[in-house]
Image (cartoon, coloured by chain):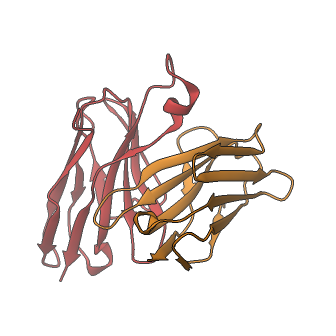
Amino acid sequence: NAGVTQTPKFRILKIGQSMTLQCTQDMNHNYMYWYRQDPGMGLKLIYYSVGAGITDKGEVPNGYNVSRSTTEDFPLRLELAAPSQTSVYFCASSPNRQGLLLRLRRAIYFGEGSWLTVV
Amino acid sequence: GENVEQHPSTLSVQEGDSAVIKCTYSDSASNYFPWYKQELGKGPQLIIDIRSNVGEKKDQRIAVTLNKTAKHFSLHITETQPEDSAVYFCAAKAGGFKTIFGAGTRLFVKA
């Protein structure tokens, strides 16, 4: 299993440009998340999804959009990039609650991150 | 709103010494407390976790303790090694999908 794979790893955007961060997982996890991590700060939840076709806002959703057309994929869209969106973005997933050991149900598996700079 | 405070923000120890990172949570409904390790250029990885019905859990050189009354939980690393150098995040979860993360502790282990 590759786990959670996100691309690109690095990207520089100009103010006002748009882009999509891709995320895919091959663990058949129902739950997927997008976090951002600012320097010296913890992880802030942008959006999450509990299954294909279902998404919801996290703590900091403004300026972003997501979709979940399949279980595997959860892309994050930035429509009009702003300097405040300069950050490291992490996609993550966690398993279905049913049928697994409790510990495995709750663990979050992260991708390796995407470094985004908006200039 | 829910909050997790983590201290210290930076910790430097000599190889072989112990390291302790402390967290405090605000949501009394929190019942699951994972710890993540983030190495340079990588995503966070779960290293140990504890549930609210347990006071202490140990896994080789790492241990976690939980004081529900005080809403405190801590990570203890004994016999630290240079490869323990990383950023460590505590987190608290109260059910549902919301995991609240601390701001992280950057641990340096000096050889």
The image quadrant that residue A64 belongs to is bottom left
Count of labels in the image: 0
* Chain B drawn colour: orange
Q: Position of residue B56 (x, y in %)?
A: 74, 46
| Residue A73 vertical placement versus B62 (above, below) | above
The image quadrant that residue A14 belongs to is bottom left
**Residue sticking out furthest to the top:** A99
Name the foreground residue: B103 vs B84. Answer: B84
* Chain A drawn colour: red
- The residue that appears at 58% across and 38% down in the rendered structure is B96
| Quadrant containing the N terminus of chain B in the rendered view | bottom right
Q: Is residue B93 left or right of residue B70?
A: left
Residue B2 visible within the image: no
Q: Position of residue A88 (x, y in %)?
A: 30, 67
Q: Position of residue A82 (x, y in %)?
A: 25, 76
Name the foreground residue: B13 vs A65. Answer: B13
Residue A109 visible within the image: yes
| Residue A109 vertical placement versus A40 (above, below) | above
Q: Position of residue B77 (x, y in %)?
A: 59, 60
Q: Is residue A66 left or right of residue A37?
A: left
**Residue sticking out furthest to the right:** B69
| Quadrant containing the C terminus of chain B in the rendered view | bottom left
Q: Is residue B89 left or right of residue A116?
A: right
The image quadrant that residue B32 belongs to is top right
- The residue that appears at 65% across and 63% down in the rendered structure is B3
Name the foreground residue: A44 vs A69. Answer: A44
Q: Is residue A114 left or right of residue B57?
A: left
- The residue that appears at 17% across and 61% down in the rendered structure is A9
| Residue B2 vertical placement versus A69 (above, below) | below
